[in-house]
Amino acid sequence: MTYEDAIKSLYGLQLFGANLGLENTQKLAALCGSPHEQLRFIHVAGTNGKGSTCAMLESIYRAAGLRVGLFTSPHLISFRERIQINRQLITEEEVVAQVQHIQILLREFPKETHPTFFEVVTIMALRHFAANECDLAIWETGLGGRLDATNIVTPLASVVTNVQLDHEKWLGKTIEEIAFEKAGIIKPEIPVLTCASEPALSVIAKVARSSKAPLSVVAEPLGNMELALTGDHQRLNAALAVATVRKLQDKIPINGDAVRSGLRNVSWPGRLQIVKRKNQTILLDGAHNPAGARALRDALEQDFASVARTLVLGIMQDKDYKSICDILAPLATRIITCRVSSQRSADPNELVTLCRTVNPAARISTAASLETALASVADDPLVIVTGSLHLTGHALQLLVPSDCRDERALNEWTGGKTN
């Protein structure tokens, strides 16, 4: 099997959509010898900020000398971004070995209960971390928490960053319903930490009480400590990460130097990431829901208040794109909408109409592609590319060339089932 064969096999799993339920993952893990039982985890859920919080936790523990596995999703460019050890992407050879092994086990499943892409990748990560004897795995949920494939583990701590409206089709129509799903990662007597606010906080607190899980609420952003990630919202995520490290001091002692070094050197691409091009600043941010758009707005008003802003906007049609346009369009003097290279892309012409409604003074147009949009704004001093992590990954690929293969289409899935 070549790497191309392995990726093609993973593409094939998209036919099985998304599956909310733990049975498949538990069975597949058992067939693999239960690798999760050999590992320690910090399990992180939340609507926004969970990836950034995972990156900060990973950076802190790595700075302390630990061997740290990092499992996150989606990826920006390469599938291999999802599974890392000490920020080294899983190699192509290791992907091939994992897929070959798991392919044999998939024969144990009838078609109607065939594991999904995310379930298979979750087991790949567990096997990779266990085989490489990771001291700790920073473990991000994919969708929700309670029925998410990652929820077969018993962590050292459960972390919920925040709860906002997103993925309503799957998780519920209200903040309270979504909070219940996120709080599903809470385990009996395992500490839980959150920076969620009301009304989600009450739901999380109720689940914690019923599980006799000690709850810590983080409400204040990080103080004077240096942080590599931009934005006030990241300072609250950082405070949550630091609180988690302190909560686990009796299990994994970490000194203050490692905390400071980890936060000072953390990297998390595609989230308020600045790319310089000649005399131009390009800001990449995957704000794909209203809460993310508000965080981006706050960062722009704080750090780029006096600069004319150009917005390159592409959003998925299954997101609340009207609210995203309402929040972001008023911030720009020029707006170019484009199609995300995905079958789920919202119509750029519809985005133009929405943006024009809230900012009629702006120059607003569409572009045939992101490449065309970036070429047309080459002389604009500040360009913000946003609305989708898929779009952000595409921009990163164009602006910061690397030897990674373009596997963004592996983020796609359609259909689904709930167990």
Image: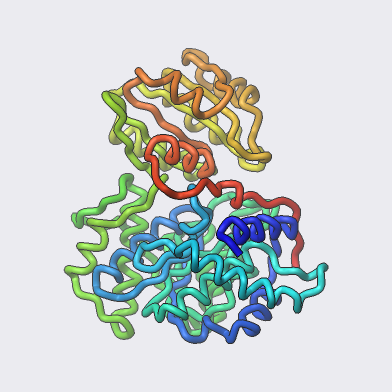
Q: Name the residue rendered at 60%, 82% in the picture.
A: 32
Q: Is residue 389 placed above or below 277 in the rendered structure?
A: below
- x and y percent of residue 283 in the render? 37, 35
Residue 215 at x, y percent in the picture: 43, 74
Residue 326 position, x and y percent, is: 53, 30
220 vs 117, left or right, is left
* Left or right side of 150 for 217: left
Task: Give the residue displayed 26% in from the left and 24% down from the top.
Answer: 279
Which residue is most to the front?
Answer: 1
Question: Image quarter for residue 4?
Answer: bottom right
- Horizontal side of 195 relative to 121 (left or right) equals left
From the image, which quarter does the N terminus lie in?
A: bottom right
Which residue lies at the image location 42% right of the left edge and 40% below the top edge?
Answer: 396
Indicate how the structure is coloured in the image.
Answer: rainbow
Decide which of 326, 120 is in the foreground and name it. 120
Picture layout, residue 211 above or below residue 356: below
- Which quadrant of the structure image shows residue 333? top left
Q: Residue at x 42, y 26 (%)?
A: 331
In the image shown, does 186 or 390 lie closer to the viewer?
390
User: Quadrant of the image for the C terminus?
Assistant: bottom right
Evaluate whether residue 396 shows in this view.
yes
- Image side of residue 30 versus residue 304, left or right: right
